[in-house]
Amino acid sequence: MFDPDYRKGDSNSTPFGQDAMLNPAPEQKIPDGPTTPQVAYQMVKDETYAQTQPRLNLATFVTTYMDEYATKLMNEAININYIDETEYPRVAVMCQKCINIVANMWNTPEQNRWKTGALAIGSSEACMLGGIAAWKRWIERRKKAGKPYDKPNFVISAGYQVVWEKFATLWNIEMRQVPLTREHTTLDIDQAIKMCDENTICVVGIEGVTWTGLNDDVEALDAAIDKYNAETGNEVCIHIDAATGGFILPFINPDKKWDFRLKWVLSISTSGHKFGLVYPGLGWVVWKDKQYLPADMSFTVDYLGAEVTQVGLNYSRPAAQILGQYYNFIRLGFEGYRNVQYNSMQIAKYLHAQLSAMPEFVPYSTEVPNPIVTWLMKPEVQNSAKWTLYDLQDKLAQHGWMVPAYAMPIDIQDMVVMRVLCKQGFSRDMCDELLHDITAAVAELNALEYPTPTRIAMEKNIPLATKAFNHTGK
Ligand SMILES: *Cc1c(COP(=O)(O)O)cnc(C)c1O
């Protein structure tokens, strides 16, 4: 029998020779006593060891590569709390400079030296802030008109990211969903307008729909809302959820009007940690003008002649991401960002073309407006194949690739798609490797004699348990 006293491993032993390594890692209770840093490190490290290499995680929108200097800067700022403005005043100023840069990138008309916006932990918080501001502005208007303000709603396509469901549930605001259909792969504007009424706080347009990578046609939405408002006397405005597009469109398609150049776009949010190219968590929200940020949501500090406006759901939060964002702005400049985004777009288009040429697949859309490729099985292949995209997902995972397969939202949920995010760090060579692995996996699956369990389940219409991916955003 094993004698636990056989040898006392102490801190002179290697971590794997120490007694503590014979114990399972704690799950319910804090351990009675301390252990060595080596053992604690090893246990924590090992628990996360077997996971995907972040750069092979093609499911996530979030940055998985930054250069050495950015990483160094961010690591060196790991002990800085953003909220301690008195102690680290330059961080607050740097944050405001990032807001100015982002606001100008989106063609803000605001002439103030310091633009109206806020830092967030990601697009989720940024969307919340944009939504809350629209809600409060609507309440003010209703109060002034002596009308009830207890039944707010907002309109959005069914391709929304889960944050909008949280927004609706947490603040008790009705979410009116415009279905996505095979004809209307993005927001159906006529339907959206039909859902508006005097209680509509805003319509949310999405630039970079999480499920598909497509963009809502915001210019047409703006024109339709302008007409609707003129006819009804309502003041429905637009919030743009540009989690992805906010850092793609300004560089790749600067002539496309989706931002503050449009009349009714009063706020825009984005994820600094997606195509802003910063490690998580960072988001930005900007308002078209100070007047659209309700005064009771903001807290203004004067420092060194700077008027720093603080808005946010969090108090303490890491400052490192702000340093990372500002570093990127200085390091890359407009041209550097454009180069990175252009390459991601080219690789996405290449992947799109290669997959389209495979006999099994068809892309979800012929256009690739963001570095996101979504595809599905051709209907005739799906009818006869002995496998599904879930099987392909599993095969690719064996090679370390994380490529999610998932069912589309309500009304087209029988459509199962697969999606790849082409981010900085996913090189042309890696893309070729992925294509090679897809081709090999498909050949193996095509050679199957019997249908796979997911194929049988699909046949019997058994809903498949969602896999480990949170495809709706992470
Ligand atoms: C990713 C995403 C979000 C949520 O963003 P986080 O930065 O992860 O909080 C919201 N909306 C859209 C369209 C997204 O793609």
Image: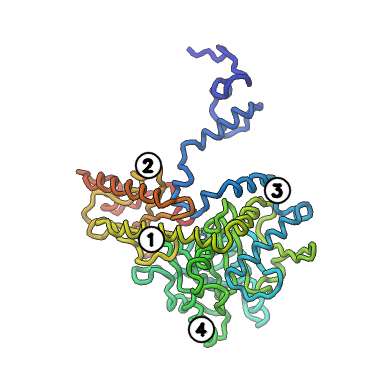
Task: Name the spot of residue 437 as percent of width and height, x first.
Answer: 33, 46
Three-letter code for the amino acid on which mark 3 is drawn: Ile
Residue 349: assigned label: 1
User: Would you say the beta carbon of the disc 4 residue lies within 8 angstroms of ligand 1?
Assistant: no
Secondary structure type for disc 4: helix
Q: Mark 2 sits on what residue?
A: 399
Secondary structure type for disc 2: loop
How far apart, in angstroms, are the residues tagged by discs 2 and 1? 23 Å
Three-letter code for the amino acid on which mark 4 is drawn: Tyr
Q: Mark 4 sits on what residue?
A: 228
Three-letter code for the amino acid on which mark 2 is drawn: His
When asked about the image quadrant of residue 215, the answer is bottom left
How far apart, in angstroms, are the residues tagged by discs 1 and 4? 37 Å
Task: Say which residue appears at 59% left-offset and 70% top-offset.
Answer: 267
Residue 115: assigned label: none
The front one of 183 and 458 is 183
Q: Earlier in the sequence, mark 4 or mark 3?
A: 3
In the image, which is nearer the foreground, mark 3 or mark 1?
A: 1
Task: Name the spot of residue 197 as percent of width and height, x first.
Answer: 52, 79
* Placement of 239 over or under 417, stated as above or below: below
Q: Crowdedness of circle 1 by 10 Å Cα count: few (<14), some, many (20+)?
A: many
